[in-house]
Image (cartoon, grey):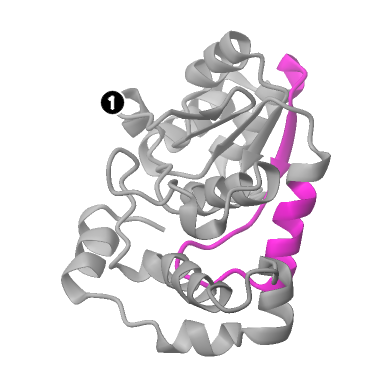
């Protein structure tokens, strides 16, 4: 579906689509906004009013949209428009919560955190899974926290359910932590490239049925 933000009627249709179909209205009740550090924040997909307020309040310079660029998304058009007006860099990053990140996506995350202007604000739709993965990689690549000591993939207060299909990255962290016990000098990217079989890790992960049912059908997470 394509949207025309150049006319009042087109903007009204796009706004309704963003609020109702793309679930932006849920952020009115639970934005899931959390501070990672003085230079980084995470949340669910904000409404445009929330976006303006938080950018100004925290001096945000870069927004990482972890849903990726999507011309068929009304919200994406509004967010891009508002970021341009506010002088904020919008970085569109496509990452899946139910897949093990590829080596290329892990490298891109590292490159993003090394190159963007801070403070940054990252979000997906609900701020639980995809945002949790990137917040974890921020702590690891930017802050130097060992991957197994990061704390961003949490049920409370972020809403991440590690036993669902969205728990694959949690599983990867566990496997990497086990490997580091005997090989403490091997970094994540080296392990992912030379040691780990990411496709096999993907295939062997077994989610719990109830947890996946809640995540997929009740919460309707990506």
In percent of the image, x 50 and y 70: which residue is there?
177
Q: Would residue 191 appear left or right of 153 to someone viewing this image?
A: right
Q: Depth check: give the residue in front, 186 or 77.
A: 186
Q: Depth check: give the residue in front, 120 or 71.
A: 120
Where's residue 23, x and y in %?
38, 39
Q: Would residue 211 appear left or right of 146 to someone viewing this image?
A: left
Q: Is residue 150 above or below residue 32?
A: below
Residue that badge 1 annotates: 29
Q: Is residue 172 above or below residue 27?
A: below
Q: Would residue 214 appear left or right of 76 to someone viewing this image?
A: left
Q: Would residue 165 appear left or right of 100 to someone viewing this image?
A: left
Q: Is residue 193 above or below residue 128?
A: below
Q: Is residue 72 above or below residue 44?
A: below
Query: Is 94 inside the magenta-drawn segment?
Result: yes
Where's residue 184, x and y in %?
63, 69
Where's residue 222, x and y in %?
41, 58
Whether residue 6 is visible, yes or no, is no
**Residue extent of the magenta highlight:** 84-112
Where's residue 5, x and y in %?
64, 28
Whether residue 155 is visible, yes or no, is yes
Q: Residue furthest left?
A: 210
In percent of the image, x 40 and y 47: which residue is there?
128
Image quadrant of residue 20? Answer: top left
Query: Is 14 inside the magenta-drawn segment?
Result: no
């Amino acid at each position: 579906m394509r949207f025309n933000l150049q006319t009042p009627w087109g903007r009204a249709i796009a706004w309704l689509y963003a609020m109702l179909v793309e679930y932006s209205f849920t952020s009115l009740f639970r934005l899931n906004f959390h501070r990672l550090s003085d230079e980084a924040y995470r949340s669910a997909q904000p409404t445009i009013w929330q976006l303006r307020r938080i950018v100004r309040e925290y001096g945000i310079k870069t927004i990482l949209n972890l849903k990726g660029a999507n011309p068929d998304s009304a919200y994406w058009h509004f967010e891009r428009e508002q970021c341009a007006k506010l002088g904020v860099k919008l970085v569109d990053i496509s990452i899946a919560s139910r897949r093990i990140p590829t080596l290329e996506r892990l490298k891109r995350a590292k490159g993003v955190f090394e190159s963007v202007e801070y403070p940054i604000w990252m979000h997906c739709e609900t701020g639980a899974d995809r945002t949790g993965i990137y917040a974890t990689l921020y702590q690891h690549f930017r802050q130097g926290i060992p991957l197994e000591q990061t704390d961003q993939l949490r049920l409370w207060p972020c809403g991440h359910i590690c036993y669902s299909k969205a728990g694959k990255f949690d599983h990867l962290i566990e496997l990497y932590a086990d490997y580091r016990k005997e090989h403490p000098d091997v970094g994540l990217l080296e392990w992912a490239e030379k040691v780990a079989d990411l496709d096999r890790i993907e295939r062997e992960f077994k989610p719990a049925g109830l947890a996946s049912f809640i995540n997929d059908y009740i919460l309707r997470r990506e």
